[in-house]
Amino acid sequence: MSFDLVLFGGTGDLAWRKLMPALFQAFRHGTLPADGRIIGVARDDLSDDQYRALIQSRFEAVEGAKRPSAEEFARFGALLHFLRMDLSKPDDYARLAASLKQRNADTVVMYVATAPALFTAVCEQIAAAGLNGPHTRVVLEKPLGHDLASNRAINDTVRRCLGERQVFRIDHYLGKPSVQNLFALRFGNALFEPLWRRETIANIQITIAEDLGVEKRGAFYDSTGALRDMVQNHALQLLCAIGMEPPINAHADAIRDEKLKVLRSLKPWTPESLSQHVVRGRYQAGTVHGGRVAGYLEEPGVDSHSRTETFVALRTEIANWRWAGVPFYIRTGKRLAGRDARIEVNFRPAPHAIFTSPLGSANRLVIKLQPQDGLELHLLAQGQDNRRNAQALAPVQLDLDFDKRFGTERVGAYERLLLDVIDGRLNLFVRSDEQEEAWRWVEPILDAWRSDTQGPRPYAAGTWGPSAASAMIARDGYCWSEEC
Ligand code: NAP
């Protein structure tokens, strides 16, 4: 199968940090179809060879084992081409059309990895240049809008230019091996399904913690914030993967229908729940991994009077028969105590104690997303110290380390998603109605913050966020895992 992959924003940060390394890994694994071209697009005036040299130099920053040798790059680099275009100029699309039509590949993927302000113009020009044929697939990066109205406006334009099945809205958390393993665990095994409900599960916690600050993206982040950057998309998609009903089959729309139902079932916000169940914070100067770091307001590109949040913790419920009354907690933030993304499913304690050990919340399923992928099942077992106390139980973990089990065969999130686009598989991409429903649900939070004079609560960099986040979960009688 032949393909052309057009990378709008081919010289940008996303292209060289994530997309090129992912494409190279697919090439190295032999999963990238052999007959392909990768065409980087930007306004620079580069020849193909200059573009290859630029990408090769960028690979220096890629971690050791994932870096190509000179011989590997020579073979991979042969796929790379460059086209100078100003995406805001309709005339420039004629050259792209000529290049694509000349080759007439079986599949054309257009990855829109450029400034969000250009997304709709790019879709309109793809259609105007007649490049929206049935073999064309368009990948849209985040952010797709700033609120429900702007998201709808983008989706309306996209729908006018392309069919829904041609549009691949990427959420790279869905491409993570652990998330696919969560689907496999839930829908490929009978073991967990009877337990996956309110009678057995006490609460579910989704944490996406970063130890980094805003780095060089202060201006972008300051107009976005943690709710829009992480909760509206990644965290809610993870919540859907955990909370959805088994789909009738593995087709994209069967899966996406079930995720949509979860989003529609999220408990609507009330003034009381907004004040009790949502905490926003902003990091101040502090210490991360032994080094002093600046506070958010001192970061380059950030308005010194900014009210943007760098941390959100919230509590919600899925109002349906399976989950009624079970709290789902979401927490995400920058400059936290560690880089750690995980979902924890906390089961209810045994109903009756016959051992002397405290039972607490010993039974937990932990789906680890970052820094490593993996699954852990926490149980109680007979302790070692049974001469002194024959009834003492000790916590143990069944640990599935994907790196150990699958080694180098393991496929990273962007690699997996790029291959899915080339193959036309939409399962791990977000449909427009899901996205709109997620915006609809977060919008009351944005409205409440706009009229709230208090602003984000401070937390010291290198901690787990404002103490109000711990107080919120403690009111239900639970704690975040690092506090229990
Ligand atoms: P970036 O580093 O600023 O790169 C933007 C790219 O677009 C550059 O190649 C730039 O090249 C090109 N470009 C800008 N205006 C253009 C125009 N008028 N015509 C042609 N090319 C143009 O941005 P980025 O960080 O890669 O982000 C790209 C997209 O991915 C954004 O939507 C961002 O929100 C999203 N995203 C990024 C990340 C990340 O980690 N970086 C993560 C998630 C999502 P020239 O200026 O030379 O033309």
Image (cartoon, rainbow, N blue to C red):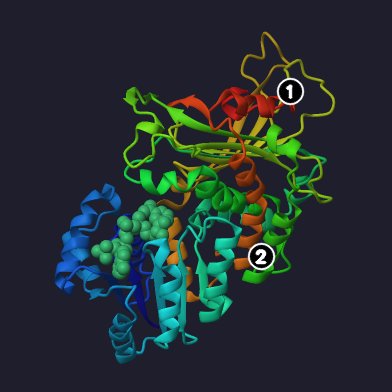
* SS for dot 2: helix
Q: How many marks?
A: 2
From the viewer's perspective, is residue 138 above or below residue 359?
below
From the viewer's perspective, is residue 410 above or below residue 210?
below
Residue 364 visible? The answer is: yes
- 229 or 70: nearer the viewer: 229
Type of residue at label 2? Ile
Question: Residue at image x 30%, y 83%?
Answer: 91
Which of discs 2 and 1 lies nearer the camera? The answer is 2
Question: Residue at image x 77%, y 40%?
Answer: 326
Picture coordinates of residue 129, whole percent (x, y)? 39, 86
Residue 162 visible? The answer is: no
From the viewer's perspective, is residue 153 above or below residue 303?
below
Q: Distance between the residues labelled 2 and 1?
A: 36 Å
From the viewer's perspective, is residue 386 above or below residue 112?
above
Residue 255 marker: 2
| Quarter holding residue 251 | bottom right
Question: Label 1 crowding class (10 Å Cα cut-off): few <14, some 14-19, many 20+?
Answer: some
| Quarter holding residue 484 | top right
Question: Residue at image x 75%, y 48%?
Answer: 268
Residue at mark 1: 359
Quarter holding the N terminus?
bottom left
Q: Is residue 114 left or right of residue 239?
A: left
Q: Is residue 235 left or right of residue 108?
A: right
- 145 or 362: nearer the viewer: 145
Picture coordinates of residue 344, whole percent (x, y)? 62, 38
Type of residue at label 1? Leu
Picture coordinates of residue 392, whole percent (x, y)? 70, 17
